[in-house]
Amino acid sequence: MDTLRGRLLVATPAIESGPFMRSVVFVLDHDADGALGVILNRPLDSEVDDVLPDWAGLVNAPVCLFDGGPVAMDSALALGVIADVAPPIGWRQMAGRVGLVDLEGPLPGNGEFAGIRVFAGYAGWGADQLEAELEEGAWLVVEALDADLMSPQPETLWREVLRRQDNDVRFWTTFPDDPSAN
């Protein structure tokens, strides 16, 4: 099996409702036991300062928590894109310059990260579940850019990722939110 770790899952119009509608998921882990990722384009109303005050000055704008997915919404995890320096203490590589940041460890120093984002919850799939959803056409798998993880306008990320593709999926960006209202 080819791993999807470090790639993006982009929801297709086949996902018509729920937490994954028009979502962009960064895949943190993928193997025979299942997959794990975080939704990148669902900012929440909660500020990082409300739950992790020491980290508020370290995260990228928008400085809010993100809905990482429907699993374990009462827990937080952080993704960090390291700067062009040695990996900082408390950072565990997931793909390229992207890794998990230990929120209980020491605060990173200035310039260690190109960006940090904090997520409430995560997206998870059991063994063969994601593969079945891919076969059904629910997801498009595309390459991730570091900038996707730290987009200052996460609400537009779904369309941005689709627009940069070199095939007809770019036209999905014109698909109405509610096709019945068309």
Image (cartoon, rainbow, N blue to C red):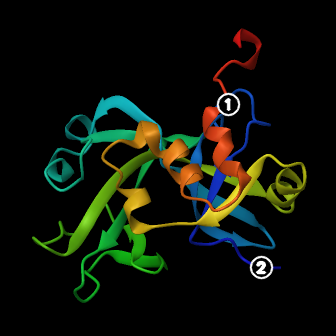
Farthest residue, direction left: 110
- For the point 30% across and 46% down, which residue is it? 152
Q: Is residue 39 above or below residue 14?
A: below
Q: Position of residue 138 (x, y in %)?
A: 79, 46
Q: Position of residue 85 (x, y in %)?
A: 22, 86
Q: Is residue 117 above or below residue 172?
A: below
- Taking the image as shown, residue 134 lies to the left or right of residue 25, namely right
The tag earlier along the polypeptide, 2 or 1, is: 2
- For the point 43% across and 58% down, which residue is it? 148
Element on which disc 1 rests? loop
* Rendered image: mark on residue 63: none
Q: Amino acid at mark 2?
A: Asp
Cβ atoms at labels 2 and 1 below 8 Å apart: no
Q: Position of residue 62 (x, y in %)?
A: 27, 41
- Which quadrant of the view contains residue 153? top left
Q: Nearer the viewer, mark 2 or mark 1?
A: 1
- Taking the image as shown, residue 146 lies to the left or right of residue 50, namely right
Element on which disc 2 rests? loop
Q: Position of residue 26 (x, y in %)?
A: 55, 59
In the depicted view, which residue is nearer to us: 26 or 105? Answer: 26
* Rendered image: mark on residue 2: 2
Q: Amino acid at mark 1?
A: Phe
Q: Quadrant of the C terminus?
A: top right
Tag 1: Cα neighbours inside 10 Å, few (<14), some, or many (≥20)? few
Q: Quadrant of the N terminus?
A: bottom right
- For the point 20% across and 52% down, which residue is it? 55
Q: Which residue is mark 1?
A: 175
- For the point 71% across and 26% down, which residue is it? 17
- Taking the image as shown, residue 72 lies to the left or right of residue 180, namely left
Alpha-carbon span between mark 2 and mark 1 = 30 Å
In the depicted view, which residue is nearer to us: 91 or 3? Answer: 3
